[in-house]
Amino acid sequence: MTLIIDGPPPSGDPGPQGPDTTDPSTEPWTARTNWIVRVLAGVSLASVAATVWLGLWVTPPDKVQGNLVRLVYIHPPIAWVALYLAFGIAAGSSVLWLWPRTRRVAWDRLAASSMEVGTVFTGLTLVTGAIWGRPTWGVWWAWDARLTSTALLLVLQLGYLALRRIPGDPDARARRCAVGAVIAAVDVPIVHFSVNWWRTLHQGATVLNANLSPTIHGAMAWTLLLGFVSLTLAFAWMLVVRYRIQVLSDRLEGADLETALAERWSEGEQ
Amino acid sequence: MWRDAVLVAGKDLRIELRSRVVLNQVAPFAIVVLALFAFALGPNRAPMLQAAAGLFWVAVLFAAVLAVQRSFALEANDGTRDGLRLSGLDPAGIFLGKAAAISVQLIVLEILLAGGVVLFYGAHIRSYGAVLVACAAGTAGLAAVGTLYGALAAGVRVRETLLPFLLLPVVAPVLLAGTRAWQVALGTGPGGDSADPWLRLMLVFAAVYLAVGVLIFGPLQEAA
């Protein structure tokens, strides 16, 4: 029943996609790990709740923007998670998977999990930005440099998820996705610069971020800081949970070899 | 690596010379796209001329998707891909060869399209240097990314729909920079602009993706 992909690689170390045919119904983690994950969940939920409480009730409304300023407590933290943390983890672990010495199935799972959770955060970045832009600029969408490059990033991430969903051999999928992630990651700085020039060669500084001046009120600054911490924790928790789902679904695939085999044949060489 | 690249490029171009698929199907399609833009923008020359630079590059992008699809359709039948992998050719050479063949075809398409833009939209090229550098750098970048994604999508059932979705967002900088450079060259852009930063951006884009392709094409070929 051993597939070609399960054969040991020439170097002799355990293959990147060793047959993980453990019963899919068993828990992949020890009780201790589960306990840590539960603590992480509790802490991240509590800190998000604290951010909401501070952002909506404790901090004062802004002199110019009124209650709209409250979006500033979540929008930059969400964007930080989406644009830097999630994408960085996904790109980094894809490179680690491609590098033969560090090739572990864990890197592929981490890249997939991070990219998927990150896509949600990128979408939220655009949504919270639009909610702020509508009353402030009068439009839901403007071809601002940051908006444009964030939207392009979202499309790149969706492309990765599309690659991810192609059925077939898990090793080929990991390879395909890792290469796709690297191509997309290389594009991100180029997109960033080109869009910045595209917008700003004929226009002053970007309108966004004008309210993040250093003269920010004390309570506001603390709330913003807490926003960064809480959303990073929330991302970490979601990432861990998503990773667990990936492990379980890989097991399910491994356990259901008959189905996988049929799928491989129907995929075939065209 | 270079010898293998010449071999692969020669093979692809020879097939194209004999089958004439790009010349007989993709080139007319590109001209049709130009005509469709003209219909969409109305019979007045002014908006067409204003948009001419961008329309040229959008047409090039569409043509590039088709050229890449054609280039990897060549490898899809008769176990050609396995043959190529068994041939012992350097993967970097295969990558450069396929990219070079796509580039040559794209250059021919771009000459046709530039003629169409001048003829149909009444554009007047003022700076041939900027036009030529933009086309050369843009073509190399498009061909490099196209070859990577073409190989990535090859052997996948959904490749026809997957390729444009993956390729077009990544080459968006080429569209932005190419359009700006052409606007300067055609004199239709906002005044006081220089084409140089855009040309540099396109050169960097092409260099980066050619380097990525040379490095990554080996592992990529094992995937399919």
Image: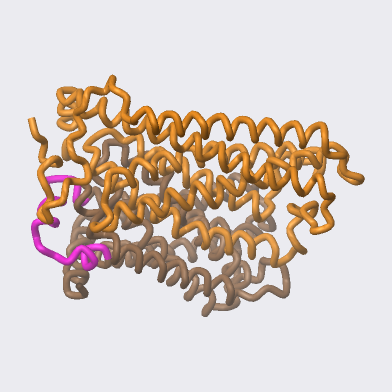
Does B93 appear above or below A154? below
Total numbered badges shown on the rendered structure: 0
Residue B53 visible within the image:
no
Q: Quadrant of residue B118?
A: bottom right
Q: Quadrant of the N terminus of chain B?
A: bottom left
Q: Residue furthest right?
A: A63
Asked if A56 appears above or below A85 in the picture, the reply is above
- Any magenta on residue B85? yes
Q: How is the image coloured?
A: by chain
Query: Which region is colored magenta?
Result: B74-95
A120 in magenta = no
Left or right: where A107 falls relative to A63 = left
Residue B16's spot in the image, x, y percent? 23, 59
What x and y, as percent, mark residue B101? 28, 64
Chain that is coloured orange in the picture: A
Report x, y in % for residue B57: 51, 59
Q: Residue furthest top?
A: A25
Residue B181 showing in the rendered view: yes
Residue in view at x 29 percent, y 65 percent: B215
Residue A28, quarter of picture: top left
Asked if residue A116 lies left or right of residue B92, the reply is right
**Quarter occupied by residue A120:** top right
Residue B4's x, y, as percent?
Answer: 17, 70
Relative side of B45 to B167, left or right: right
Q: Residue at x 59, y 52 (%)?
A: A149
At 28% from the left edge and 55% from the top edge, which residue is drawn? A102
Furthest residue to the front? A32
For this rendering, which residue is in front, A224 or A153?
A224
Q: Which chain is brown?
A: B
